[in-house]
Image (spheres, grey):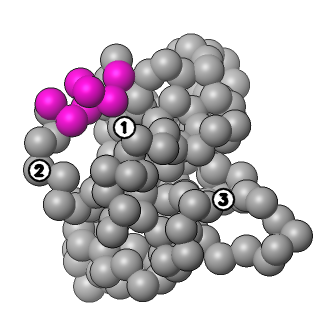
Amino acid sequence: MFNIVLVTPQIPNNTGAIGRLCVNTDSSLHLIKPLGFDITEKAVRRAGLDYWEKLDLHVYENIEEFFEQHPNNSRFFFATTKTNAPYFNTKFQEGDFIFLGSETAGLPEKLLKTFPQQCFTIPMSKEGRSLNLAISTGIILYDAIRQNFSTFKEHM
């Protein structure tokens, strides 16, 4: 349905939980190295429970390899705290690529500067600075599904 792209994720439990989200939404998970863990690590499997082997998983050595394999970037969207554009104003379509950065650094600034019109944020109070990566993924992914629910029902 959608493509979730994690750029250099650091916490295995987040990636496992996101993998589970992807299986349950018929979405693909793309991991861009370097990773902060081994994807065969017990914590990832535990967080993904018995879903990990059902996951449509793609792993790339670096962001350049990802872009070589996916040259059409018109449907790439980037979650960041460095914009004021709320995610719910983005008009998602089936097959879109939704990028999220590492838990410690977010997305590389070069990506954000290359695609400024394709960046969005999850609104937060001034007291918060960021949300958990898996929670952020769930918020965005399920809004994308809400926008495309008639198509999503066909996958159920």
* Label 3 vs 1, first from the N-terminus: 1
* Label 2 vs 1, first from the N-terminus: 1
Residue 112 as seen in the image, left or right of residue 80: left
Tell me the residue at 64%/29% (across/down): 10
- Provide the secondary structure element on which disc 1 rests: strand
Visible residue check, residue 46: no
Q: Amino acid at mark 1?
A: His
The residue that mark 1 highlights is 30
The secondary structure that most of the magenta stretch takes on is helix
Which one is nearer the viewer's eye here, 49 or 60? 60
Tell me the residue at 69%/25% (across/down): 43
Tell me residue 28's x, y (percent).
Answer: 33, 46
The residue that mark 3 highlights is 135
Q: CA distance from mark 2 to mark 1?
A: 16 Å
Q: Residues within 10 Å of mark 1 (few under 14, many from 20)?
A: many
Visible residue check, residue 108: yes
Residue 96 in magenta stretch: no
Tell me residue 70's x, y (percent).
Answer: 16, 40
The residue that mark 2 highlights is 72
Q: Amino acid at mark 2?
A: Asn
Tell me the residue at 24%/73% (across/down): 93
Up the image or down, 11 lies above or below 99; here it is: above
Q: CA distance from mark 3 to mark 2?
A: 28 Å
Q: Residues within 10 Å of mark 3 (few under 14, many from 20)?
A: few
